[in-house]
Image: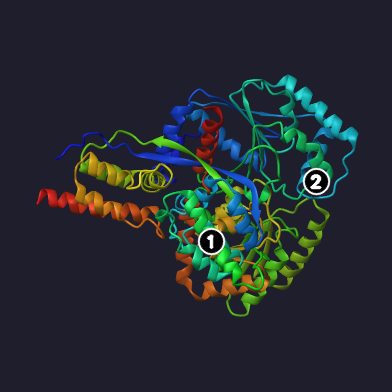
Amino acid sequence: MIRVEDYRRVAPPGVVDIILTLGERVRGKRLLHLSGGRFGGGAAEILQTLVPMMTDLGIDAAWEITGGDPAFYSTAIALQAGLRGAERVLTDEALDHFVEMNRVNAKKLSLDADLVLVHDVQPATLIQHRVAAGRWVWLCHFDCSRPQRRPWSFLRPFVNQYDAAVFSLPAFARRVGIPKYVMYPSIDPLSEKNRELTLREIATTLSGLGIPQDKPLLLQVGAFNAADDPLGVVNVYRLVKKHYDVRLVLAGAASAEPESAGVLAELREAEHRDPDILVRELPPDAHVQINALQRAATIVLQKSVQESFGLGAAEAMWKGKPVIGGFAGGLPHQIVYDVTGYTVHSVEGAAFRLRHLLNNRELIARMGAAGREHVRRSFLITRHLVDYMALLIHLTQ
Amino acid sequence: MRRAKHPFVFTGCVELRQTLDHRATDERELLERLEEVPAGSVFYHTHGYFLRHRPITTAYGNDFAAWVAAHLRDQVLAERLAVVNPFEFATLEDLREELASVIHDHLMRLSSVPRVELGEMFYFQQSHIVEVNLGPGAETLAEFRAGLASVDASAIYMHMVEARARLGRRAGDFAEWIRDSLEIPDLADKIERIDTYMTNLERVRARVLTLVDAALEDATA
């Protein structure tokens, strides 16, 4: 049972009172979320917490998902990849079938609500079946600023039927004929991935992962692919290792992309040659392990060269760690340069900033504390809930 | 203790951000877009800066100066834009004209226009403010002090920034209420003189509290 009051001890002072006051204004409003699934990251991860919080406030909040046959899912995946800029084959037949399957979904679902929030691509064409009174908003949780022409030509007429769209960053938005709002994503401070852990829990978890705690720990959590640049992080570590006896942990999941196997093989080779490089493949639900690693880290890296919003930086800052991140996606919006960490453009830049911090240890604590307060204000789920309620009020009152 | 003619009701706010189709990749485009965006966007990137940079002391004071410094690496223009105090202008159009004039004068002295290379474009935005009533009103200076100490920082923004700049209450709500309703003009004058530029909302709160505490001490002495 998730209760808004539980967040009073972690949210900024006064925010829960604002939420409760806004809640009184929207009590009884019918709000419907539509997404492609209930599990995994992105929209689903956020909705697992936000929907119960909305219910706790007296909002008549519901969350429905769309489904279909394998062809429907594969077209949804290809469409989303195409909108992210990847080249994919999308036939007219596949797109027609996709629209038809959502017509079937519309028949099964009750779409009558004061505000209908449609998350990402899979349910996007349901807008054709909107019920007269409600307002409809499309929420795009990924960067669709540089889509391939074909998927965007398909989706744009649907998007333009919505009353508004929401993007994570202005830079992620595509030009459309409807108002575009901006909401940063958020982290749940009470979730398994972010809740407080005791020193014993951290030690036990790291021991289970085979990671000793006898040296300063540099950590990157992310996919083993070129976008997250773990090989670049190994090169950063090697530059730093000349001066400081540190250990590097690369934790994450191998992705399904073919390049991922090659990246992982190179990382394994690096691990084999240097006992202070530790590569840990983790399952998608390794939330406590990631939490413990971030809490045990001295400095966290997110040296991505291509990134969506990249909430890993906010997660690490919430645990009081300075973050050195690549200048990509949402990282420059999370990391306040020289206050909560640094954004860098190169391996050398990351190594320079790591050495600077390791040589000025008092900065690590100071930046970590500033980062935690920055996240408290800007990236907790309480702020996200406020954003949703502001949208509900703005569009329905 | 003196009671106010009308209670002071603290009002916080939440901000719904809207991105516009105006963006700039260099200083000339920044000037051109600045001249055509809605006045609400000028407000968002100047006065609204304080609402979004609550815990961190502002280095530049507005989004234009911050972007020019961080993404174009043009410290000269950043400094010139940073000293434009939005609270000194009677209207948003006056403020827009001053900002445009600063950029125009700067461009006249340059042989090449600084452009984004590794950084991010400037995206013009505006916001919709949803006001939030924060509880029962204060009827005495002591009640006002207690309320001020605990309200969400957005209430400081609403009463000290939004009230003055967008709602036309030039003295700010705190000073206006203390002068007109509590009839303590000396304290009202001091609060009205607080410089809300180049600082953050928590420091503004602390300064108002310090002045109120001094007035409360004087009253009991």
Q: Which residue is drawn at 30% across and 45% down?
A: B174
Nearer the observer, disc 1 or disc 2?
1
User: Between residues A378 and A232, which one lies in front from this camera angle?
Assistant: A378
Q: Residue furthest bottom?
A: A242
Which chain does tag 2 point to? A
The span from disc 1 to disc 2 (Cα, nearest Å) is 43 Å
Q: Residue B41 placed where, x, y %? A: 54, 48
Q: Of the residues shown, which amino acid type is indicated by label 2?
A: Gly
Residue to which mark 1 is pinned:
B101
Q: Of the residues shown, which amino acid type is indicated by label 1?
A: Ser
Q: Is residue A342 above or below residue A314?
A: below
Q: Residue A355 placed where, x, y %? A: 57, 75
Q: Is residue A83 above or below residue A204?
A: above
* SS state under label 2: helix
Around disc 1, counting alpha carbons within 10 Å, would you say few (fewer than 14), some (14 to 19), or many (20 or more)? few
* SS state under label 1: helix
Q: Residue A226 placed where, x, y %? A: 75, 60
Q: On residue A82, which mark appears?
A: 2
